[in-house]
Image (cartoon, rainbow, N blue to C red):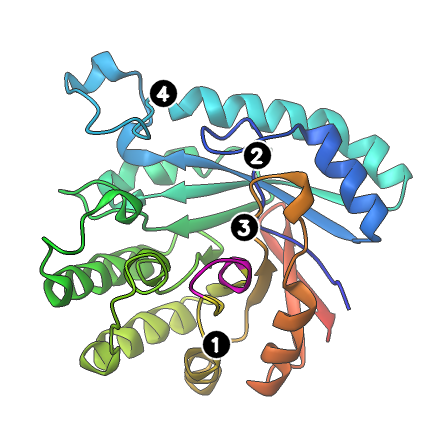
């Protein structure tokens, strides 16, 4: 079963490849009914570099994400009608990275009427580079994880988004790439607080299946935390492959659906004009 893929990137994102047309063609080939294009829009680098008067810390720190968002919204909006005629629901989305860098700006950006869907993600702590770029042999991993969940909680309480992206994202690199085990039990209460904040505000989480095709080998989050979110009253669940190329579209989604069912979910949803559309699993 392939109900949707609501987290994907094209070459409009700095780390993606391909085009909107290419992703649409692949979605049709796969028989995917719903496709969300959610390019990276890092709110701590939303404006051009000159605005911040700082130098990038690595090659991945690209500025002027306002241009990324505008390019994506225009391209996807133009492709919607033809996609619909061909039986594909195409969504204008964004992956809003680090909204806690400037909540007022993030809220303003999220009001764009063209947006169907906002994923809120925390790719980096506000005083550090992306978790992808850190040297974990030199880092205090427990402190990093505690700060990650602290900052994630502030995002959950803010709540001007639709779903929280890839919970436990740092494990993609700490466990998957560096091979360092990270027990999550010390952060259990922080995770519960995040889920409670989401459930109280009617916000969701995504089941991000990218880990299935990466060294990490598991989804974000795993079954234990899907169950916990459900037990705490969470009802809003989307599925996303986090594909950065057309070839990875929908990978792991069928497996993710079975995992969601095991966690007690009987339905999932996607968003149109920021309103959830629920479907049965």
Q: Name the residue under label 4.
A: 64
Q: How far apart, in angstroms, are the residues tagged by discs 3 and 2?
A: 24 Å
Residue 279 or 260: which is nearer the viewer? 260
**Whole-percent x and y of residue 278?**
69, 67
Q: Is residue 59 visible?
A: yes
251 over 133 or under it: above or below: below
Sequence order check, earlier mark of 1 and 3: 1
Closer to us: mark 3 or mark 4? 3
Q: What number is the disc on residue 242?
A: 3
Q: Is residue 105 visible?
A: no
Quarter of the figure that contains the N terminus? bottom right
SS class of the residue under badge 1? loop
**Residue 212 magenta:** yes
**What span is in magenta?**
210-216
Closer to us: mark 1 or mark 2? 1
Q: Mark 1 points at which residue?
A: 234
| CB under 8 Å between discs 1 and 2 | no
Q: Name the residue under label 2.
A: 113
Rendered residue at 55%/21% (across/down): 71
Residue 202 or 245: which is nearer the viewer? 245
66 over 259 or under it: above or below: above
- Estimate how packed mark 2 is, as few (under 14), some (14 to 19) or many (20 or more) residues with alpha carbons within 10 Å: few
227 over 251 or under it: above or below: below
Say whether residue 44 is left or right of residue 82. left
- Estimate how packed mark 4 is, as few (under 14), some (14 to 19) or many (20 or more) residues with alpha carbons within 10 Å: some
Closer to us: mark 1 or mark 4? 4
Sequence order check, earlier mark of 3 and 4: 4
Rendered residue at 31%/44% (across/down): 99
- Estimate how packed mark 1 is, as few (under 14), some (14 to 19) or many (20 or more) residues with alpha carbons within 10 Å: many
SS class of the residue under badge 2? loop
């Amino acid at each position: 079963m392939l109900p949707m893929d609501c987290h994907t990137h094209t070459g409009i994102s700095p780390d993606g490849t391909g085009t909107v047309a290419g992703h649409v063609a692949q979605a049709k080939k796969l028989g995917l009914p719903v496709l969300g294009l959610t390019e990276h829009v890092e709110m701590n680098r939303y404006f051009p570099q000159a605005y911040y008067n700082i130098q990038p810390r690595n090659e991945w720190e690209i500025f002027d994400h306002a241009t990324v968002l505008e390019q994506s919204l225009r391209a996807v909006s133009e492709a919607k009608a033809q996609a619909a005629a061909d039986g594909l629901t195409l969504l204008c989305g964004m992956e809003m990275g680090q909204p806690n860098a400037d909540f007022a700006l993030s809220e303003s950006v999220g009001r764009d009427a063209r947006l169907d869907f906002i994923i809120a993600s925390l790719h980096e702590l506000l005083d550090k580079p992306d978790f992808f770029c850190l040297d974990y042999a030199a880092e205090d991993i427990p402190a990093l994880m505690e700060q990650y969940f602290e900052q994630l909680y502030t995002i959950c309480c803010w709540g001007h988004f639709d779903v929280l992206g890839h919970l436990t994202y740092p494990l993609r690199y700490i466990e998957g790439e560096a091979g360092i085990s990270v027990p999550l039990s010390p952060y259990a209460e922080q995770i519960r607080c995040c889920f409670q904040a989401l459930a109280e505000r009617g916000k969701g989480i995504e089941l991000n299946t990218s880990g299935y095709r990466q060294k990490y080998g598991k989804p974000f989050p795993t079954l234990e935390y899907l169950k916990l979110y459900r037990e705490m009253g969470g009802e809003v669940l989307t599925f996303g492959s986090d594909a950065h190329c057309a070839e990875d579209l929908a990978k792991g989604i069928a497996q993710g659906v079975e995992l969601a069912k095991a966690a007690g979910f009987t339905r999932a949803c996607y968003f149109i004009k920021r309103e959830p559309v629920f479907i049965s699993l």
